[in-house]
Amino acid sequence: MSLDVIGYDLVADNASTNGVLGNISTRLPVGSGDNVLIAGFQITGSNSKQLVVRALGPSLAQFGLTNVLPDTTLELHDSTGAVIATNDDWQDAANAQSIPSALRPTNQLESAILATLNRGAYTAVLRGYNNSTGIGLVEVYDTSIGSTQLGNIPTRGFVQTGDNVMIAGLVVQSNNKQVVVRALGPTLTGFGINNALPDPTLSLYDGNGALLVFNDDWRDTQESIISGTGLAPRSDLESAIAGTLAPGSYTAVVRGFENGTGNALVEVYGVN
């Protein structure tokens, strides 16, 4: 299984003048084999950053979701693919009591990793214990304050229909933030990923659930703006949205056009 979530490096933002991409999360059906949930993130700046990475399953049932992942496992990889931390049940972690109380999972079968990470790219992999399947949620929380910040945020997983689509959440902190959000499918085939989503669509919602922007094929609406960022998708059937977001919470939803299914990648880039 490839852990590459296919990203591009951008110049790190100046936190004093630009908004900051804060806590991130992605909800998706978790399968087995290549169809697990893979979330990537970057740490920019010169200092280390303390993060809490969580993998939730059973607790999602309280929000009305069915077929939730009954027991999660979580791996954290560095940019070489090496495993730097693992967790099955969060209370078993050696530093479990150091996890901020507000970020401790509510179910003992869920997973959490508290780690201090240096600048670089990282990948969190959410699987079901003993190859169990169901809807899972992976989250990355920034617990530190400083100029070091979370950078580009990609997540890969298997998109289905109905409630089983890919849902990625992000938080913009401080000032307004220019972002590009992308949904890729056909491009993944070139990276050895089978059963790619043939035609993704992308919807961006605000914290109240109101639809802000919808895009199917990226060239249809903001072609010149997106091309100017250097982040144009490789396939005309892929989706992208460029815009400036005020501080707050947002959700990006990736679906298949006409209920198509397959592996897809959702990405959030902060741009200057």
Image (cartoon, rainbow, N blue to C red):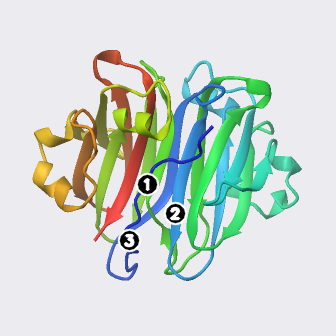
The three-letter amino acid code for the residue at tag 1 is: Gly
- Residue at 59% across / 81% down in the picture? 47
The three-letter amino acid code for the residue at tag 3 is: Ser
The three-letter amino acid code for the residue at tag 2 is: Gln
* Of pointers 3 and 2, the one earlier in the residue sequence: 2
* Of pointers 2 and 1, the one earlier in the residue sequence: 1
| Residue identifier under label 1 | 7
Residue 52 % position (x, y):
66, 58
Q: Does residue 202 appear left or right of residue 112 in this picture? A: left
Asked if the residue at tag 1 contacts the one at tag 2, i.e. Cβ–Cβ closer than 8 Å, the answer is yes
Task: Please rate how many residues cluster around mark 1, counting C-alpha atoms within 10 Å: few if below 14, some from 14 to 19, many from 20.
Answer: some
Tell me the element at label 1. loop
**Residue 199 found in image quarter:** top left
Query: Which of 224/29 is in front?
Result: 224
- Residue at 36% across / 47% down in the picture? 207
Residue 211 % position (x, y):
25, 38
**Residue 209 found in image quarter:** top left
Residue 162, compared with residue 85, is above or below; it is: above
Q: Which mark is residue 174?
A: 3
